[in-house]
Image (tube, rainbow, N blue to C red):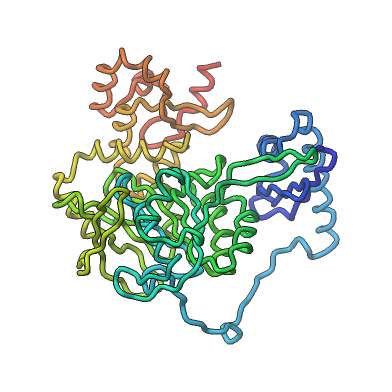
Amino acid sequence: MSDQLRIECGPADGQRRRLAVATLNGRSHRDRFDTDSEYHRRKFRESVVEKFGLPDDAHDVIERQVIAAADAEDDRAAGSNAGLWRPKLVTMADVESRPIRWLWPERIALGRISLLVGMPGAGKSFLTCDMAARVSTGQRWPDGSPCERGSVLLVTAEDDPGDTIRPRLDAQGADVSRVHQLAGLQRQEIDGSNAEAIFSLGDAGALEAALRELKDCRLIVVDPIGSFLGARTDAHRDNEVRAVLAPVAKLAEQYGPALLVVMHRRKGGSALADDTAMGSRAFTGIARSVWHLSRDSENRDRRLLLPGKSNLTKEQSGLAFTIAGDPGAVQWESDPVKMTADDAMAQEQGARGEGSAIDEATGWLRDALTAGARSAKDLRDEAQRYGIAWRTVERAKGKLGIVNGPEGFGGPWVWKLPDSASLRQESTESANNQTLADSGETVADSAGLLPPDDDPFAGESAWLADSF
């Protein structure tokens, strides 16, 4: 099958990266990387082999095609202006002014991405089922504003459709014939058998095909976003998050539904509620509105839906609801809540006495490394954005038993959470580790294996030399 594979390369940009597109049987895989780098070419080959289920001997075919395609593009560009980047100018006089269209007036816009952020157990899925029920029936929104009837597309991972989603929709009075779940991808193989695959937002073509089929779709719910970014996307890197969300945002704008992205909230606090959304700031950056769902600090049965970022209209009031019945259904309060998400965050931090700096840093670091290993430089930059002192992060590292070192021979210096085996091995050294953590050091620090605090990369060459 690999002999039917076709690879094309675009021109190199200022960082020597170029877009490479691999196509096989109507499916494609896209990546942008330095085709002169053997390491990057290997990563691309592995991605293509995994994407298309190719045998291991396809690596040679992919390698030859990538190099040939890159050379062909360079030869073509050398004889023309095709490879030159030129400014694309849009004159505002040629732009047609149009009003914003709303799913939920002045709260959730059509054709745009909105975020719903909250801790596990806050009631995010109950809320999205309530919204889906209203859209499917045309029932008014909780604040009394009108809701136009249409279809709903659920992209969900954590709740079972049979024992959780359907009962909740029924409890809310949904027209379930208008509510659909994008349960995955399927295709028919050449031998007539059916193959299935997990859906991710990187499969924009599949999402577009679903929207073509659901012509009256007015709401897409992605719950939670971390389950659908794709295994190779680092949720803490702005460029990787935007690379996944930008095509999806264009589809929402083109076909018109509101795209509601559900996100978990990190455990560490912040002065700004929007900064507690787990992952890169690209999530809140690309969203046009952010809503935060939390429990009332004085009544845990009461949920507060409070405004964060609002780019398209003035800030709206918050709302409150409880969950009652079996299966549970959302019951809204009639009075608005005169509080923002930032106000609630301040109250929450005050109620717990602000918490200790080390506990905040430990929660932040655990969340930051949940998706996988990250470089010390990335962590340091992000900690600075969140106002967390690097010395405190170092103490949190010791408390969590973070493993750090080069990623492969000659690779970047990375931190990662210990696996269960590492945790068992380190349990006998916990007292020593805690002492070092309290002093701002780790076991590796005391052994001279880590770079000094003022430079997360200093000392790597010495470490490698000593190791080999």
Q: State the image coordinates of residue 455 (x, y, percent, origin top left).
A: 41, 36
Picture coordinates of residue 111 (x, y %)? Answer: 51, 68
The image position of residue 312, as x and y in percent, is: 41, 73
Residue at image location 44% in from the left, 36% down from the top: 376
**Does residue 319 appear left or right of residue 39 in this picture?**
left
**Can you tell which quarter of the image residue 321 is in?**
bottom left
Where residue 296 appears, x then y in whole percent?
Answer: 19, 53
Q: Is residue 446 above or below residue 54?
A: above
- In the displayed image of the protein, which residue is found farthest to the bottom? 93
Residue visible at 52% across and 26% down in the picture: 461
At 34% across and 75% down in the image, what residue appears? Answer: 145
**Lateral position of residue 25 relative to residue 427, left or right:** right
- Relative height, residue 100 to residue 427 (above, below): below
State the residue in front, 321 or 101.
321
Q: Is residue 119 left or right of residue 37?
A: left
**Foreground pick, 232 / 81:** 232
The residue sitting at the top extreme is 428
- Quadrant in which the C terminus appears: top right
The quadrant holding residue 54 is top right
- Above or below, comparing residue 325 to residue 331 in the picture: above
263 relative position to 53: left or right = left
The N terminus sits in image quarter:
top right
